[in-house]
Image (tube, rainbow, N blue to C red):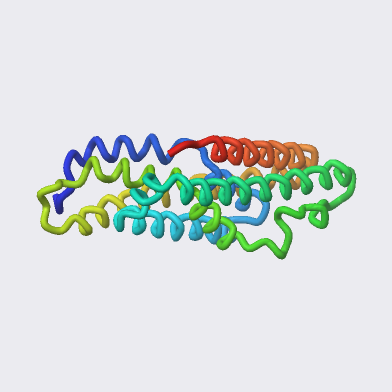
Amino acid sequence: MLGVIDLPTYLAGLVLIILLPGPNSLYVLSVAARRGIRTGYTAAAGVWCGDTVLMTLSAAGVASLLQANAVLFGIVKYAGAGYLTWLAVGMLRAAIGMWRARREKSVEQADGAGGSMERPFRRALVISLLNPKAILFFIAFFVQFVDPGYAYPALSFVVLGAFAQIASFLYLTALIFSGTKLSAAFRRRKRLSAGATSVAGALFLGFAVKLSLASV
């Protein structure tokens, strides 16, 4: 179909890959839990735009360039790790503020990671784009399902990318609605909110370490 081979295998692998936890999905869940469905979808839109850019770059051969150039790969890798670390620090600082204010009626002023100045779309977009491993993944995964003899390989990439975005939309939608249900519990139980923010910050720090140690 349009130069795509072994579509069932691709879809099965795609589902498994989408379900693996990562900084993008965790960030969308966190935003939805703190700020509701609409803002959750704003963050998700940043993920989808970032993924689209990465797919386009992969189809254009940028992934191969990163794979061949260790210096360029290192620059993107450490920039991504640094950004994730910055997000982790913000979440951990917010958690500390929540712990200090847990007996107050509202902790919204302490939530530095989710305040009114947060720009979920931009933040999610940057998280997506500063992930060289994602670029390499897209080219390594996609190329296996593109018929080398097909006259319009770009069309094959579009088909594969469309399936990837549909799967991502369904998954992030589930996370967003799960996050809004969690938000009600967070409002009732400030200790739970502080604990969840602490865990999210620690996970983002783990993502940063994992990315900084990644190799081509």
Q: Which quarter of the figure is the C terminus placed in?
A: top left
Residue 97 location, x and y as percent? 83, 47
Residue 188 location, x and y as percent? 77, 44
The residue sitting at 22% across, 43% down in the picture is: 145
The residue sitting at 24% across, 40% down in the picture is: 144
Left or right relative to 10: residue 110: right
Number of dots carrying numbers: 0
Of residues 34 and 91, which is closer to you in this image? Answer: 91
Residue 118 location, x and y as percent? 67, 61
Left or right relative to 56: residue 36: right
Of residues 187 and 64, which is closer to you in this image? Answer: 64
Question: In the figure, 152 relative to 94: above or below?
Answer: below
Left or right relative to 185: residue 67: left
Left or right relative to 20: residue 11: left
Q: Quadrant of residue 201?
A: top right
Residue 6 location, x and y as percent? 18, 39
Question: In the figure, 160 relative to 120: above or below?
Answer: above
Question: In the figure, 132 relative to 13: above or below?
Answer: below
Q: Quadrant of residue 162?
A: bottom left
Question: In the figure, 151 relative to 135: above or below?
Answer: below
Of residues 39 and 91, which is closer to you in this image? Answer: 91
The residue sitting at 30% across, 50% down in the picture is: 163
